[in-house]
């Protein structure tokens, strides 16, 4: 009986199998790369706001403490957006006629609000509590980056689960003394590993097994 397939078919079959495996691997790599990219995570993306608020000016140049505006970060699960009155504490005296600040003055006169665009917006299935992190020694800079250098606010981390888990698995790498929570450009006074290990015990931070349990963040 004559041969149905040409001998070259064997080589073609091997190449095809190799090509399919390579294509699947490439597709997986491409998907993972896209999933971690700023296009998907919005990392580094500046969000347009009704008033162009500059943290670089208020925090970096003027040295205003984060808690002056975000008053509930130490006591509440939500870092509040400051009320218009907080803005007007200063701007009733300075930049009183600036066109840029007219939406602020208008809201203050009418008792209205400003619809700010959220920069850090976690999915509804993720539970996050600001006060727990702040009181356990996680600094503002750890999650928000050098906000004191941002003329316009952008999302600093990816906010993906792997980013959260890195800290939850190794909290000693990130925690700092509570009095340095709002310090920008924080440098530990010694070895971070030793200081962090001491603070983890002092602040009674739970073990990595508990911190990485699904129910810790997904409730």
Image: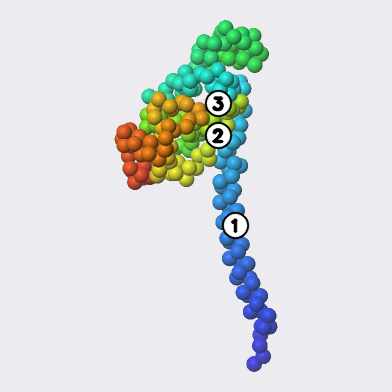
From the image, state whether disc 2 or disc 1 is nearer to you: 2
Instruction: Name the residue tied to disc 1.
Output: 27
Q: Residues within 10 Å of mark 2 (few under 14, many from 20)?
A: many
- The percent position of residue 172, horizontal first and vertical second, equals 39, 39
Position of 61 with respect to 6 (left or right) is left
Percent position of residue 103, x then y = 61, 15
The part of the image, by quadrant, that contains residue 213 is top left
Residue located at (47% from left, 45% from top): 162
Front in this rendered view, residue 81 or 199: 199
Which quadrant does the C terminus fall into? Answer: top left
What residue did someone put label 3 on? 148
Element type at mark 1: helix
Q: Which of marks 1 and 3 is in front?
A: 3
Q: Which mark is residue 84?
A: none
Using the numbered discs, state the Cα–Cα distance from disc 2 to disc 3 in whole angstroms.
Answer: 13 Å
Q: Spatial distance from mark 2 to mark 1, Cα to Cα?
A: 28 Å
| SS state under label 2 | loop
123 vs 52: above or below: below
**In the image, which disc is placed on residue 155?**
2
Residue furthest front in the image: 190
């Amino acid at each position: 009986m004559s041969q149905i397939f040409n001998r070259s078919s064997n080589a073609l079959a091997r190449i095809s199998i190799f090509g399919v495996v390579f294509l699947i691997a490439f597709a997986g790599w491409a998907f993972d790369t896209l999933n971690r990219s700023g296009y998907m995570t919005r990392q580094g993306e500046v969000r347009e706001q009704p008033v162009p608020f500059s943290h670089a000016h208020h925090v970096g140049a003027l040295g205003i403490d984060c808690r002056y505006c975000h008053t509930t970060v130490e006591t509440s699960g939500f870092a509040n957006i400051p009320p218009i009155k907080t803005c007007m504490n200063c701007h009733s005296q300075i930049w009183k006629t600036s066109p840029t600040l007219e939406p602020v003055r208008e809201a203050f006169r009418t008792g209205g609000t400003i619809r700010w665009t959220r920069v850090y917006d976690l999915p509804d299935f993720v539970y996050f509590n600001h006060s727990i992190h702040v009181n356990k020694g996680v600094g503002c800079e750890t999650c928000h980056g050098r906000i004191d250098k941002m003329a316009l606010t952008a999302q600093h981390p990816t906010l993906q689960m792997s980013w959260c888990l890195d800290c939850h698995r190794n909290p000693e790498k990130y925690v700092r003394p509570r009095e340095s929570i709002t310090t920008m450009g924080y440098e530990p006074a010694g070895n971070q590993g030793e200081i962090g290990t001491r603070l983890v015990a002092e602040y009674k931070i739970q073990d990595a097994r508990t911190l990485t349990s699904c129910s810790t963040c997904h409730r």
